[in-house]
Amino acid sequence: MKELPWIKNALLPLSWLYGSITDMRNFLFDSGILHSRKVPQKVIVVGNLTVGGTGKTPVIEYLTRLFSHQVPVAILSRGYGRATKGFIEADSNATAATVGDEPFQFYTKFNRKAIVAVCEKRVDGALKLHEKHPDIPLLLLDDAFQHRAIRRDVNILLNDYNRPFYKDHPFPAGRLRERRRGAKRADAVIVTKCPEGLGMQEKENIRASIGACTREGVPVFFATTRYSAPVSYEGLPVQLKNVKMAAGIANPAPFAAYLTTRFVVTDQNVFPDHYNYTSGDVEDLIKNLKNDTFVVTTEKDMVKLKPLVASKGCADRFAYIPVSVDFGSDEPAFAQWVTSQTGNGF
């Protein structure tokens, strides 16, 4: 539903108040009244100013693939939506309920390449990881741009091409977690979810808009979302024609748009972000499902739905679409930049 301008204007005073509160918090850190603690690992943060999905998970996965070939890597998340608290290192007993859906996705993909852990207090999590794994020199922090209690070596800010932060306002009139000036903490900005064939002139315009909010000389990289061939919940490639969409992610619109361009979408089922599916949800999804139709989800939904559909014996009716970030022609430059920022100090 399109937001009415008068509603946004009416909420602007509350956005000013919310922005002032975040400004005060940032001032306390900038002035040293509140302290950012240095931890033993090199720290790379991936985050955003915008509430909702800007593509953090694919970027964390890209960085894991890039650095795990060079050094041991750990991924630390808050573990949003989990039913547990405190520090937990993902292991063979981990589930989306114990560590959160995105960390469980990381563990499922990278358990042989990286350590995955969750902790609400990132400093505590980093120190416990170092205590358990002193040989790991690199820590990737997921969704921690505003978590300033931990000092970072590289701050990567994501900007959704479709919802640019430089045109937005703080909550509740907009979707920003803090004012646009928070972008001055960024060491680089990645414009995610760009359309294919984005022109040079538009890129320069976006760079100029972002540059007005960041420090001088901060690089801007452009990336698209790459959807891979569908995979069944049984782990096999699958041919799809008719699909029933199910998605519990922050911004399902791009996923829905992709499905409608590739398949015949018979129905769209949208759930809240980090939604915890139930057996009843599975029953509703497969109810009246025709033999030539698959329930298709994101990978993030798959890690939560898979045990439920397996228990009901219908895993062969479900598939998911793997997603990755594609830097295109910017890939060599970004890989060189982010590698150089660690100072080769491993």
Image (cartoon, rainbow, N blue to C red):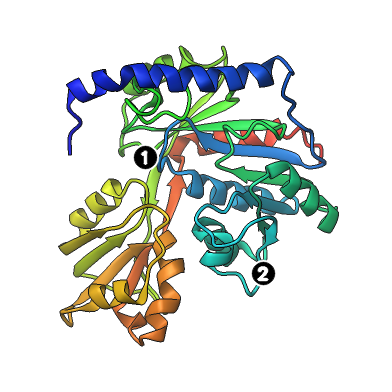
Residue 193 tag number: 1
- The answer to whether residue 300 is above or below residue 333 is below
Whole-angstrom CA distance, mark 1 to mark 2, is 32 Å
Quadrant placement of the N terminus: top left
Q: Are the two marked residues, 1 and 2, in contact with CB atoms closer than 8 angstroms?
A: no
| Amino acid type, mark 1 | Lys
Residue 147 tag number: none
Residue 91 tag number: 2
Name the spot of residue 104 as percent of width and height, x first: 55, 63
Name the residue at 25% across, 19% down.
10
- The answer to whether residue 310 is above or below residue 99 is below
Q: Secondary structure at mark 1?
A: loop
Name the residue at 21% across, 68% down.
243
Name the residue at 60% across, 21% down.
26
In this view of the protein, can residue 320 be seen by the observer? yes
Name the spot of residue 322 as percent of width and height, x first: 41, 60
Quadrant placement of the C terminus: top right
| Amino acid type, mark 2 | Asp
The 10 Å Cα crowd at callout 1, few under 14, some 14 to 19, many 20 or more, is: many
The 10 Å Cα crowd at callout 2, few under 14, some 14 to 19, many 20 or more, is: some
Q: Earlier in the sequence, mark 1 or mark 2?
A: 2
User: In screen coordinates, is 117 left or right of 231?
Assistant: right
Q: Nearer the viewer, residue 276 or 136?
A: 276
- Which quadrant of the figure has residue 301? bottom left
User: In screen coordinates, is 128 left or right of 107?
Assistant: right
- The label nearer to you, 1 versus 2, is 2
Name the residue at 62% across, 37% down.
45
In this view of the protein, can residue 69 be seen by the observer? no
Q: Secondary structure at mark 2?
A: loop
